[in-house]
Structure formats: structure tokens, C-alpha cells
Amino acid sequence: LEITQEQGSAPDRVVLGVAVEERATGELQVSGGYSSEEGLIGSLSIRQRNFRGLGQELRSSISYSGYSKSVELGFTEPALFDRNIAVGFDLYRRDYSSYYTFEDERQDTYQQVSTGGQLRAGLPLNEHVSLALRYGLVFDDVSLDETLYYTTNEDGVSACDPILAGRYLCDAIGSRLTSSVGYSLLYSTLNNSVRPSRGERVLFSQDFAGLGGDTKYLRTRISADKYWQPFGQFIFSLHAEGGAILGLGGAGDADVRLTDRFFLGSPQLRGFDIRGVGPRVQRIPYLTDEDGNVSLSSDRSEYTEDSIGGRYYYLGRAELEIPLGRGARDLGLRPSIFADIGALWGVATPTLYDLPPDSEGLLRPQLDSEGLRQCITGAGVISSLPADAETCPTGSTLVTYQVTNPFREFLVGNSPRPRLSIGIGVNWNSPFGPFRIDVAHALLAAEGDDTKLFTFNIGTAF
């Protein structure tokens, strides 16, 4: 508040005025960090909260990690027609790599590129309840590394080989368009949306895909959180959530596509690796001893495992944040103890292979430079088989090669039986940025689950 006397005015006349300093509305943030799960992480974002001087928000971002890359653009009008209704849109391109293995070099199974956008609107229904509406249109392209999972068939066409990749992955390959509409209802009485210590929050959402496009499903999710301070500065919180996705494609497509399913593991369920819980196809090699006896390997480091997601899941968490002395608080240290519980299940059993040694299913025809099959006589003479011929001439056999080693596949982990872990964690607002470390031990696990004792994340903005 400023009080001034105007020049030439009477001594008893003053002018009251308010000095207003305009605050910057633009924001540029560069973030970097490292995760034990995704390796190096980096992002660049630009946001303008008063676009065109109308209070509108325009933002764009680029992010990168060892297994995902994305570019996004968003716009929000906070007061449509001067009413308390927010509307906006998002455009994006996201590249993902599915990366579940266990002690094996098979780091990437399939790659998914999603290009799409979303229209959204939100409005408060009362002091604590708000409604959000959305419409999304996404084009997905799923692919596999052709050098690892493709072979050339008798017609000279290179295609995904289910013996190399698994039928469940070959079926996921291709492009599809998803057109979906959805809504979310939010109830919240939290005292702080970033770091709450009191209140509760409940979110219910549904998305229906099938307004045109190639995908049809109904996805439902619900989550609830409760925070309170039982005594002193201790903060106790409970979290529960669950979801279900129902395929609506009819008898020929009753199951849900691999890329639309739920996945569960770290960081949601600590004590387990990324996608470390739930249905997975386990491929176990056959071994032959010196006496010719055939058996399945018991060394899990030789197994190949792929998480194939589930149609139902639940997740629960109880956590107690422990206050420290003033010195530790000044350093930004916030330790906690926690217990996590959850499960993922509900997929139809995919086609599973059992190919012991000498199985014909392991063999593929050896093609010549023109893509024709070849035949070999007892004398070792090799000749190409005409394309219209079905079998080799009498006295010769088809030239083949073994595409992979003998193996047998099993579906494991497809159970609603709870997985349980307990542990301790520490949040630290370090000079390098937010740092989180968790040490968790899995008390209950199912066959095939991939446990993990230690995880951490660190990042900063500069």
C-alpha cells in the first residue's frame, strides 16, 4: 500500500494506491536422473500459464529413458464461457519397449509406438467432488525385432515365428486404432495435494473403447487413499485400488489384447521387479545328459519369461512416515515403513509349446537365394524344389535347420492369491534433487514372480 501527496494539492489530500508487481507465468524445466529400473532419465518441459494473457495454459514436454520416449503438447482453457468449466486437449507420441526378463539377455520383447490425442473437460460438482470427461483417439503400432523373432516361410515371406517369440507375442504384432470415451469422479478432502497429512481421496473411472476403431473393451478402475496423524508428526496412510478390463470383441476376440492389459510390479508393488507379478509365460529348456536322458532344466537363470499382463488386479498399501529431529528435517529426510499387497490375474491360457529334442516343430526349411526350399540326396547333392512341388523327389529329403533349442512353455502366476511385501524407505530432498530408496522383502510370492530387494530413484531440475 502506497500513500502519496499529489503535487500542488492541498496538504490534507492524499492518494491511496496499490503497487502491483506482475509475476512471471512462463516456466522452463530441465530434469535429469537415474532409476534402478529405467536407467538414465531426462526430460525437458515448457509451460505458459497465461497464454495470450487469458489465463490459458499451454505446455509441451519431451522425455527419455532407457525404455521409453515421448513428445507431448497440451492446452487448457480454465474457464470456458466464463464458467467454472475447464476444457483442453493433449497430443502425444510415445515409444515404449516391453522389457521383462529374468537373468537373461532378452531385454526387449516388443516395441509399441502410440500416436494420439485426447479431448477433456472438467468441472466441480461441489466443494469436494469433481467430474472429468474425455475422448481419446490413439493409433498403436506393435512390432518385434525381426532379426530375433522372424523366419522366412516356404513362400519366401518373412513372418513372426511363434516358436521364437511365442504365439502371444506374434498375435500382438500389428497396427490398430482405439477410439474411446471415459469419465472420472473424484472426491477429495486432502489438506495438501502434493504431500497430504490429513483427509481422504477416492477416484472412480471408466473408459469404453469401441466408438469405431479396432479395439473394444470396458476398463474400470477405483482407488482410495486415507491420511491422518495418529500422534505427533507421524503420518499414517492407507491406499487401496483395483481394476478390471472386459473385452467386448465377441466370441472371436473375447480376450483383451496384450497391450491393453494391466501390469503390476515395481514401483506400485515394492519388493517385486517391474512387471514382476502376475501371468507370465515361462519357457524352460530341455537338457540331455550323457546317457541320452531328457529332462527340463532346474536352473532358473536359463529360463526365458515374458509377462503377458492380466485383466484384473488389486493393490493395497499401508505406510507410516516417521518424523526425525529438526536437523534431519532440515536436510529433507523422511523415512517410512510400509507393507504392500496385491495380485494380477485373469488371462486366457495362450497357445503353449512343448518341443522336446528331435521334435519336428523345431525345424524350418532351408531356403536358397531365391526363397525356394531345397532337397538333399543320400549322396549329398542339393537341389532347389520348385514352388509348386509339395514334397521332395523320391530318394531325397528336405533340407532343414533347427530354429531354436528344445523347450517347454508353462503359464505361471495367473492367480488372485495375494503377494505381500514389507520394507523401509527414505525420501530425501537432496542437493541433487528428490531421492527415494526402498528396501523391501517379499513375504508372499507365487511361482514365476520376480522379486527385487532394492530400488531407488534420483532426479533433479536445473
Image (cartoon, helix red, strand yellow):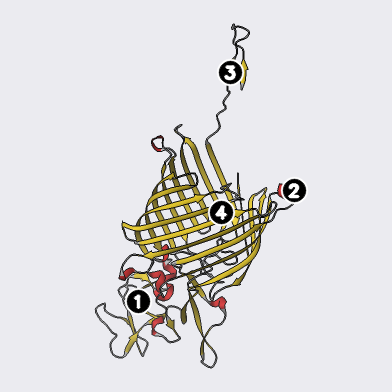
Of circles 2 and 3, the one toward us is: 3
Q: Which numbered disc flags the more N-terminal residue, 1 or 3?
A: 3
Query: SS for tag 3?
Result: strand
**Residue drawn 38% across and 58% down?**
140
Image disc number at residue 41: 4
Do callouts 1 and 3 mark residues in contact (Cβ within 8 Å)?
A: no
Task: Please say if 10 is above or below 195.
Answer: above
Q: Which numbered disc flags the more N-terminal residue, 4 or 2?
A: 4
Of circles 3 and 4, the one toward us is: 3
Do callouts 4 and 2 mark residues in contact (Cβ within 8 Å)?
A: no
Label 1: how many Cα within 10 Å (few below 14, some 14–19, many 20+): many
Which image quadrant: the N terminus? Answer: top right
Image disc number at residue 16: 3
Work out whether residue 261 can be spotted.
yes
Image disc number at residue 367: 1
Amino acid identity at mark 2: Arg
Q: Which numbered disc flags the more N-terminal residue, 1 or 2?
A: 2
Label 4: how many Cα within 10 Å (few below 14, some 14–19, many 20+): many
CA–CA distance in space, label 4 to label 2: 32 Å
Image disc number at residue 326: 2
Q: Where residue 33 sits: x, y (%)?
A: 60, 52
Amino acid identity at mark 4: Ile
